[in-house]
């Protein structure tokens, strides 16, 4: 019986009124969390938060209805965990973009009902020969998620070896918006960013971000909260972070979304990625024995 067997998972980790384990789309095992504050579905593959919806709100995360839910395939939407590198691997183009964490199995390590009604669940990445071949550094990766009126996601990297290593990482969050034309992103005004559309160039953000064509940007050296102001849903999503020095903003727009094949028609209009990251110049060195923790806290506010 594997540690991810449904009945074993339910007998060790289910909590009535908080969390149970089920077979999800494509046969993936998921933790289904429903409490008095919110609901969320998290796949054990990738420790991938697929949905989060505080009661009384429209879904906050975007999840493609046309995505491939299959073992070893990354899920299009929710919060893919990019680790231990972000984007293409620096030396070996054959290694998977955004690292392997999002496509391998993680094990559930703890579930807890919190006094405020939220549900806590933590996962550990399961190392295999295949992960060690891609990442030979002794380390552990854990993802801790708190599902409540706020969604808190923590990615902890511990160096269990005797030499320092460098990681790139992102909580690559896809947000659900009413329509890209009715949305602005605030909080990155004045920041320097690498614009990856049509060759990489360095630019400075003037005013809030509006999206009217493909956007693929890495904002560097920023720790400010980001706000996704959504006039259609009359709300703003706040993304606060700790130990995140980069923010990636991405919308593939028409052509790229069509090529990717898992966005669906017009899918790009209802989403934007605002990723809490450490990438490019902001990669992190983790010293032997040290732990680095990237955190994102997501909440929803009514627009005045
Ligand atoms: O298709 P993937 O691997 O999930 O990546 C999606 C996008 O992720 C973003 O973080 C990158 O900046 C984009 O360049 C990339 O296209």
Image: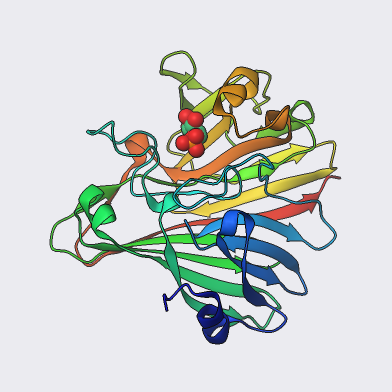
Residue closest to the eye, 204 or 125: 125
| Residue 66 drawn above or below residue 6 | above
Question: Viewed as shown, does residue 136 lie left or right of 207?
Answer: left
Residue depicted at 67% across the width and 30% down the height: 268
Q: Which quarter shows the N terminus?
A: bottom left
Residue depicted at 66% across the width and 28% down the height: 208
Residue depicted at 48% across the width and 58% down the height: 45
- Tell me if I can see residue 20 in this picture: yes
| Residue 29 drawn above or below residue 109 | above
Give the image quarter of residue 176: top right
Give the image quarter of residue 148: bottom right
Q: Which quarter shows the C terminus?
A: top right
Colour scheme: rainbow
Residue depicted at 47% across the width and 19% down the height: 203
| Residue 96 drawn above or below residue 11 | above
Identify the residue at the far top of this view. Answer: 198
- Tell me if I can see residue 206 in this picture: no
Residue 38, x across and y down, in percent: 74, 66
Residue closest to the eye, 5 or 233: 5
Residue 265, x across and y down, in percent: 72, 27
Residue 233, x across and y down, in percent: 84, 42
Residue closest to the eye, 46 or 173: 46
Question: Viewed as shown, does residue 147 lie left or right of 88?
Answer: right
Total labels: the figure holds 0
Question: Viewed as shown, does residue 5 lie left or right of 49?
Answer: left
Residue 134, x across and y down, in percent: 25, 48
| Residue 258 drawn above or below residue 171 | above
């Amino acid at each position: 019986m594997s540690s991810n067997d449904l009945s074993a998972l339910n007998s060790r980790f289910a909590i009535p009124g908080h969390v149970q384990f089920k077979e999800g789309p494509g046969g993936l095992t998921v933790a289904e969390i429903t409490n008095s504050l919110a609901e969320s579905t998290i796949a054990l593959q990738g420790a991938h938060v697929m949905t989060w919806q505080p009661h009384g709100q429209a879904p906050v995360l975007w999840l493609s209805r046309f995505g491939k839910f299959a073992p070893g395939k990354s899920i299009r939407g929710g919060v893919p965990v990019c680790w231990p590198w972000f984007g293409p691997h620096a030396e070996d183009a054959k290694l998977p973009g955004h690292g392997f964490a999002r496509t391998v199995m993680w094990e559930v390590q703890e579930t807890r009902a919190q006094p405020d009604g939220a549900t806590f669940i933590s996962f550990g990445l399961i190392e295999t020969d295949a992960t060690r071949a891609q990442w030979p550094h002794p380390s552990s990766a854990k993802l801790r998620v708190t599902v409540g009126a706020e969604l808190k996601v923590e990615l902890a990297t511990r160096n269990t070896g005797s030499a320092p290593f460098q990681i790139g990482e992102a909580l690559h969050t896809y947000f659900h918006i009413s329509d890209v034309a009715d949305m602005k992103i605030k909080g990155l005004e004045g920041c320097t960013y690498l614009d990856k559309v049509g060759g990489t160039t360095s630019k400075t953000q003037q005013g809030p971000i509006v999206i009217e064509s493909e956007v693929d940007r890495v904002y560097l050296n920023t720790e400010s909260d980001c706000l996704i102001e959504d006039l259609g849903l009359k709300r703003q999503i706040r993304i606060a972070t700790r130990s995140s020095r980069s923010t990636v903003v991405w919308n593939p727009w028409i052509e790229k979304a069509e090529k990717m094949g898992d966005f669906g028609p017009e899918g790009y209009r209802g989403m934007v990625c605002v990723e809490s990251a450490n990438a490019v110049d902001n990669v992190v060195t983790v010293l032997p024995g040290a732990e680095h923790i990237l955190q994102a806290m997501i909440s929803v506010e009514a627009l005045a």
